[in-house]
Amino acid sequence: MEKKIRILIARLGMDAHWRGSIVVAKALRDAGMEIIYGGNQNPENIVRMAVQEDVDIIGLSSLSGNHLELAPKVVKLLKKEKAGDIKVIFGGTVAPDDVPKLKKAGIVEVFGPGSSLKKIIASVTQIAAGSAG
């Protein structure tokens, strides 16, 4: 049996915008992935959960404008914990100018408002297979 892709979905900080993360989590689950839903977390807790749960990917969500500070912190903490093989993706409201900054900071893929679930599922599948990022 093929190993299921394990993905942690978490919202950065105290972001109250939960709907998008739930919709994406359900779509990934329905596509056969194993989902660990973390809810609102700080970067330290996200990394701790990701390591404990042995996930392949962390999916971060934020609509609060804290993405340039908190998303790169998750990547740095993963490296510090010797878990840099866990890939990080981001979804939320992101100014187009911020996308290259996030990617330079180690975020593998960024999904803005209106990203199709089909595209997200395909990207996560490719990232987990090692053919992206």
Image: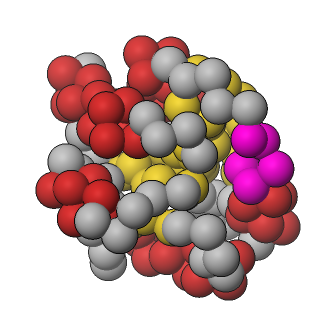
Q: In this view, does 27 lie to the left or right of 132?
A: right
Q: Residue at left 59%, top 46%?
A: 63
The spot of residue 42 in percent (x, y) is: 50, 19
Q: Quadrant of residue 32?
A: bottom right
- On the rendered image, what quadrant is the C terminus found in? bottom left
Which residue is rendered at x = 67% and y = 65% of the image? 1
**Foreground of the two, 54 or 13:** 13
Q: Main secondary structure of the magenta part?
A: helix
For image coordinates 35% across by 70% down, the residue present is: 96
Q: Is residue 16 magenta?
A: no
Q: Give the range drawn in magenta.
A: 17-21
Q: Tell whether 13 sits left or right of 39.
A: left
- At a point 19% along the width and 48% down the height, the residue shown is 105
Instruction: Classify 118 as above or below 81.
Output: below
Left or right of residue 127: residue 8: right
Left or right of 118, for residue 69: left
**5 is higher (above) or lower (below) than 38:** below
Q: In this view, does 122 lie above or below 34?
A: below
Q: Where is residue 24 in the image (x, y as percent from the top left)?
A: 73, 60
Spot occupied by residue 4 in the image (x, y as percentages of width and height):
64, 58
Q: Residue 20 in magenta?
A: yes
Q: Can residue 85 be seen in this view?
A: yes
Q: Can residue 130 be seen in this view?
A: no
Q: Which of 22 and 131 is in front in this view?
A: 22
Q: In this view, does 55 lie above or below 77?
A: below
